[in-house]
Amino acid sequence: MSSYLLLLFILAFFLHNAEEAIWLVRKSAQPSKIKRQPKPTQDQFLFAVLFVTALAVLITAFYLFYPDQWFLKYAYFGYVGAMILNVFLVHLPSTILERRYSPGLMTGLLVLVPVNGLLITRVFQIKLLSLADLIGATGIMAALLLLAIPLLFRLAGTLIHY
């Protein structure tokens, strides 16, 4: 698979996370119909966003250099799939239920879903992964990210004192 195509994921992910970083903490400070864990501070949220973005860059870089490593292939495409789930299972329902825009939805629908959809389509065309492999990798990566985010918020609360 073309390196350029693989790098499009990082560009799309950066744009999506930039949109979230700009508005999501202010949005989450508003009263909500959806019960969530304690709302993160700006520092906690940015720390978590930087971590998951850096992790995506690291996984992509290693996959570009070592494309035959099964673990990196599954981690990369698991991340790609998990970001599609993020758009449809987090941002879209939040926008609908709250009846107000959820930061990340626009870049999710206009950039992440098309780019990641293109990557997934290409994966199936060249038979790099099966559907079952992609679903498994996506589920594992989504679960790991869901578990990591509250831990990253706590870690940021401990480390960042400006």
Image (cartoon, rainbow, N blue to C red):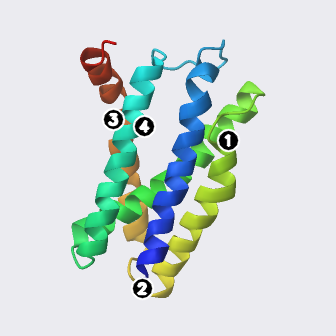
Q: Pinpoint residue 20: horizontal percent, then vertical percent.
A: 57, 36
Q: Residues within 10 Å of mark 3 (few under 14, many from 20)?
A: few
- Residue 75 quadrant: bottom left
The circle drawn on residue 127 is 2
Return the residue found at the far front: 162
Residue sitting at 32 percent across and 35 percent down?
Answer: 148
In three-dimensional space, the C-alpha distance between marks 2 and 3, rounded to whole angstroms, equals 30 Å
In three-dimensional space, the C-alpha distance between marks 1 and 4, rounded to whole angstroms, equals 19 Å
Q: Is residue 16 visible?
A: yes
- Is 111 in front, or is 89? 111
Circle 4 residue:
49
How many discs appear? 4
- Residue 103 quadrant: top right
Q: Could you tell whether 47 is left or right of 122 in the image?
A: left
Q: Residues within 10 Å of mark 4 (few under 14, many from 20)?
A: many
The circle drawn on residue 147 is 3
In the rendered structure, are the residues bearing label 2 and label 3 in contact, judged by CB atoms less than 8 Å apart?
no
In three-dimensional space, the C-alpha distance between marks 3 and 1, rounded to whole angstroms, equals 21 Å
Q: Amino acid at mark 3?
A: Leu
The circle drawn on residue 92 is 1
In three-dimensional space, the C-alpha distance between marks 1 and 2, rounded to whole angstroms, equals 30 Å
Q: Residues within 10 Å of mark 2 (few under 14, many from 20)?
A: few
Tag 4's secondary structure? helix
Ranked by sequence position, the earlier of labels 2 and 3 is 2
Q: Pinpoint residue 39: horizontal percent, then vertical percent.
A: 49, 16
In the rendered structure, are the residues bearing label 4 and label 2 in contact, judged by CB atoms less than 8 Å apart?
no
Return the residue found at the far right: 99
